[in-house]
Amino acid sequence: MPTTLTLGHGRHSAFHQLNGIIGCMDAVDGEILDELRVNGRASFSELGRLIGLSTNATAARVRRLERNGVIIGYRAILGSDVPASEEGLEAFIDVRLDPGRNSEDFLAWTRRIPEVRDAVHVTGAYDYLVHIRVPSTVALDRLLRSLKNDGGATHTQTRLALR
């Protein structure tokens, strides 16, 4: 089962992002984090072989990274968390809610919609950014209509991901 590494202070670049914040990391720590991001279940022995350290030295470094809050956890990625196919449309919808719409009710509504991957509260002209995946433009149109009729959106702006 694939796992991913959860890093403290962001998730983008293991060494470069975190070293500026933590200040106690070196390039070997960065290599460890890069390897754990690919395989969070790698043993200390396997990690050591990949980066050129003994098992004990690798274990000590990983434990230090955990203790210092650089690594804050490990998690399983379930098959149901990954789209079965990359076919269809991936979109990001900026949503402005009706002033009378309760935010918690809106979030509860999004959790009932299987096409919604995530909904985050944002600053700016819109209230939420909703990440979706739908099989077609017809399904996108249906979702947008439901977002306005049932979800409480007064304005939306949709952007399609081209990757």
Image: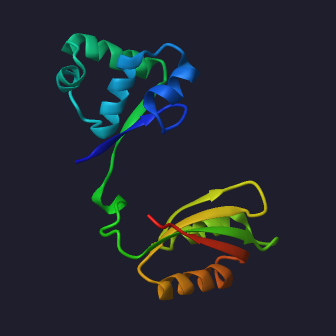
- Percent across and percent down for residue 115 are 47, 73
Q: Quadrant of the C terminus?
A: bottom left
Residue furthest out toward the front: 162
Where is 83 relative to 45, above or below? below
Residue furthest out toward the right: 99
Q: Residue at x 40, y 76 (%)?
A: 88
The image quarter containing residue 103 is: bottom right
Q: Residue at x 33, y 50 (%)?
A: 77
Q: Residue at x 54, y 19 (%)?
A: 22
The image quarter containing residue 82 is: bottom left
151 horizontally vs 60: left or right: right
- Percent across and percent down for residue 28 are 35, 18
Where is 68 relative to 81, above or below? above
Where is 18 relative to 58, above or below? below
The image quarter containing residue 55 is: top left
Asked whether 147 or 32 is in front, the reply is 32
The scheme the figure's colours follow is: rainbow
- Percent across and percent down for residue 18 are 51, 26
- Percent across and percent down for residue 49 are 17, 21
Label count reads 0
26 horizontally vs 78: left or right: right
